[in-house]
Amino acid sequence: MTQIANFIHGIYPRSAKLVQTSRDVDRNRLSQKDLLKQEKADLVKLFKLQKSAAFDYIEDGKLSWQDIFRPIVLATQGLEVGALTRWFNNNSFFRQPIFSKKVRLNTGKLDDFFPNTKPSKKWKVTLPSPFTFAKLSEGDASFEERLAKTTEILQLIIKYLNKKGVSFIQLNEPYLPYHGANDQDLKLFIDSLKTLYKSKGNSLFAVHFYFGDAAPFVLKLCNEKLADVVGVDFYKTTLKSLPRRIPFDIIAGIVDGRNSLLENKAILRSFIKETLKRLDPKVLYIANNSDIEFLPEEVAAKKLLILKDVKTYFQK
């Protein structure tokens, strides 16, 4: 019988107070100490919300991350913060990573961005996929060289997270579903995953595809043992396009991170029943389809509680 579990992944929206505090620090009205204090307050609030939602794994929401790449860039010699760039077709932006010379990760600098794992024994971390990272970066190096360097950096970060006791590591891959891929892209992607999967240690290792049709990439991974869990954006992927009896646990992206409209619980329950019949995984993780930073904080909180209600229904 399939176990139904739940969590969130990626960047969580900052509170209005944290946003204002950050602006005040930029304008020298408040100190960095004030910002850290408010970040901690937001983090405690998010922990409590996840606990009340009975989440199986806990994330920190990346409340101190300016974007999905920035901490990695800041912790790596040879990477620079580049131009402000639109994040796919969303009304949000990131600073493009620039490869300037030989790269070297300083794991000591990561401590500011990965809080202590003591709040939960089931701690989860979302990282950018190396393919997305390399595709959205620039520099004198070729894409293949950037991908190799990014894979090396993420391999070290995964080992660092293993030492901190992280039990679930998820790579988010929006670039491939959004843009599609040729055979060479797929080969490079698979080769990168092989390297990272070998470094996962005791952690569960997941790859989540979103912003497009995940089916071609899930099909490709079915022929390879490169992940423990595979994630699907079910707002962009039809259930029928996926093979039956997928040999992975599944992340079902059933809560829309880009739409403030609250999901209908009855519709979600019906969809989960269909998913269980077709895919029959040992564990089905119900989650957001993409980062939920695009939503107001109060809407995001309500969507977390929807995940709780859907999970509870299947535990009766």
Image (tube, rainbow, N blue to C red):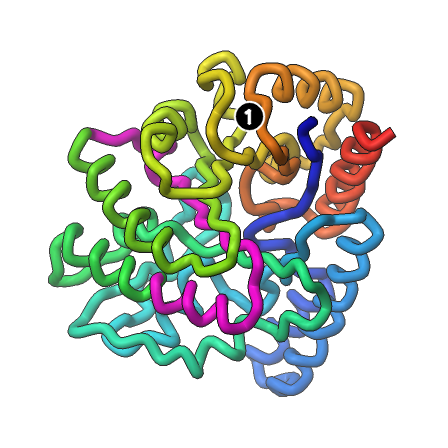
- Residue at x 34% of width, y 62% of height: 155
Q: Secondary structure at mark 1?
A: loop
Q: Residues within 10 Å of mark 1 (few under 14, many from 20)?
A: some
Left or right: 1 in relation to 309: left
Give x and y (percent) for residue 113.
53, 72
Check the picture and name the quadrant holding the N terminus. top right
In terms of image quadrants, where is residue 80?
bottom left
Check the picture and name the quadrant holding the C terminus. top right
Tell me the kind of residue under disc 1. Tyr
- Residue at x 42% of width, y 47% of height: 87
- The answer to if 202 sits in the magenta stretch is no
In terms of image quadrants, where is residue 159?
bottom left
> Residue under circle 1?
235
User: Furthest residue to the top?
Assistant: 240
Magenta segment range? 155-182
Q: Nearer the viewer, residue 27 or 143?
A: 143
Give x and y (percent) for residue 222.
38, 29
User: Furthest residue to the right?
Assistant: 316
